[in-house]
Image (tube, rainbow, N blue to C red):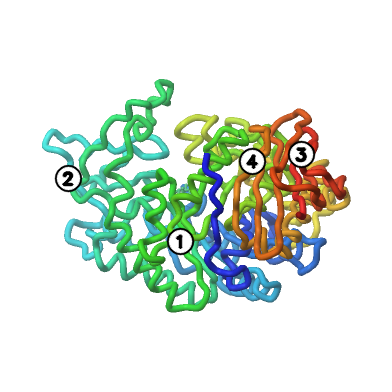
Amino acid sequence: MSSDQYTNPQSSHDLLWWQRGVIYQIYPRSFKDTTGNGIGDLQGIIERLDYLNDGTEASLGIDALWLSPFYPSPMADFGYDVADYCDVDPLFGDLATFDQLVAEAHRRGIRIIIDYVPNHTSDQHPWFIESRSSWDNPKRDWYIWRDPKPDGSLPNNWGSIFGGPAWTLDETTGQYYLHQFVKEQPELNWRNPEVREAMMDVLHFWLERGVDGFRMDVVGLLIKDAKLRDNPPNPDADPNLPPNDLAGRLLQVYNQDQDEVHEIIRDFRRLLDEYQDRCGIGEIWFELPRWVKYYGENDDGLHLPFNFRLMQQPWQAQAMRRSVDELEAALPPFAWPNYVLGSHDSPRLASRFGGQAQARVAAMMLLTLRGTPTLYYGDELGMENGVIPPEKIQDPQGVNLGAERTRDVCRTPMQWDAGPNAGFSDVEPGSGEPFDGAQDRPVEPWLPVSADYATRNAAVQSADPTSMLNLYRRLLWYRRGSPALYGGDYQPLDAGDADVFVYLRTAGDERRLIALNFTADHRRISVPGEDTGQIVISTHLDREERVSLSDLELRPHEGVIVEL
Ligand code: GLC
């Protein structure tokens, strides 16, 4: 195991906001409803900005928001099927509300990152409506159309990630179009220069409106094999896959991650670089050697290809250390690391990693590793997977591939308080007045509020000094004041117990030791070469004391930050 020190080439005070800051993902449908229709909206986000960062330690203390899509959409994939890239769906508000959100966020020092969905549009996008109208429509080539094989079968064997084939026949013109998600998400043809230009215009539109960055949806899928060759079978496919999971039975070789995609990403980056301080983030799931290429060869790619690797490991100290060390070793010198532990596509952190107790250890790890952390709304409360009755499943992945695959579980309404609908949707429909129960029942939110909302919510946890929320606040505000944590070097340490992940973060004279006990037992570690230190944060939020580092006891599920 290497014990290399991974060094930050810039000094901490030169770092940009997306390097030193913490990103918080909001799924707008589920955050705060101000119209009483059971669906969250942009006005709701504006109203809760103070919760996110009001400049004091009573707020969470995040630096940037990433908003999942709010564009006009038929909602076949809840906004990831965009019918107009340059507007706001009336469900969420309008462009004026968006501008107000940007202004209100910026006033608080919060940056706004928006979702950019370049791989596919909605089938209701005017471009696709034109494209499918006839063979010779000028937009025909904006999407990926192919003839059936001579025997009438599909153009190739690719499967949709949401089940079934990746091709749907258009009866009018007799050709198939490609869609690697639902059939309502036809894929744009990024080999066509007009598509590139139109989609660059979209970035331009939002940059001019003052957004600080983009999270680019499945950006590694933009270019497919020029010959659209069949994907080879996946020898390791789970034999119990649902029969319609065709994609799961194949290796994803020709449908994604083609070298030419980097040319497009370089174009994105050139545009971002024309503006000051903007950030390009990409959703990239590939293996490390392919993934790392998305930073570009010479700092000309994405600023941050999202790093989901920690979510894919077993919850063990050495697995985490290995993942972090492999990442650090693979990064080119200009590349800035980042870590993600939760998103709108994955089971909840508190349901995935050994429950609530280890979710606190996860929080400390995420907020003390070297690199930009991305938090997912509600994880700061320890929100768990929602229980979705089969008839209430919304997510196409759950509808098509079975209840256990539904992503609805991590999209349930934010739990603000113990009031109606957890405070998520607590106004009279239409009027915006607080729901008073006089006339009727509060609206039913688009996904059920989790049963634990009366006790697990932001209001209750704000008042509880040792709650998960207060742990997140403490970690975020401490991090903000610590160059070692937000910008320093990282060095893993062997401290005598393989179940405790121990590392050092340093910047100049500032040295911080982090020790994370991944077990439910008491553990003792011995930090080589160190005598004593001061515990400043324990995940239990109940001790701040001077301790011996040659024999440091950690309680079950305890992580600590120690000032050396
Ligand atoms: C990305 C999004 C996911 C969406 C898919 C298709 O993976 O994160 O939510 O369903 O792309 O746009």
**Image quadrant in which the C terminus is located:** bottom right
Alpha carbon distance from label 3 to label 2 = 60 Å
Query: Toward which corner of the image does residue 51 lie, by quadrant?
Result: bottom right
Return the residue nearer the eye: 374 or 372: 372
Q: Which residue is mark 1?
A: 333
Sequence-first disc among 2 and 4: 2
Instruction: Identify the residue position indicated by label 3 in the image.
Output: 558
Which type of secondary structure does the marked residue at label 3 adopt? loop
Residue placed under numbered mark 2 in the picture: 147
Contact check, label 4 and label 1, Cβ < 8 Å: no
2 or 1: mark nearer the eye: 1
- Write the residue at 67% across / 58% down: 485
What amino acid type is highlighted by mark number 3? Glu
Classify 10 Å Cα crowding around label 2: few (below 14), some (14-19), many (20 and above): some
Q: Nearer the viewer, mark 4 or mark 3?
A: 3
Residue 141 vertical position relative to residue 324 in the rendered view, above or below = below
Looking at the image, which is closer to me, 313 or 248? 313
Q: Horizontal and vertical percent for residue 186?
A: 34, 51
Residues tagged 4 and 3 counted as in contact (Cβ below 8 A) = no
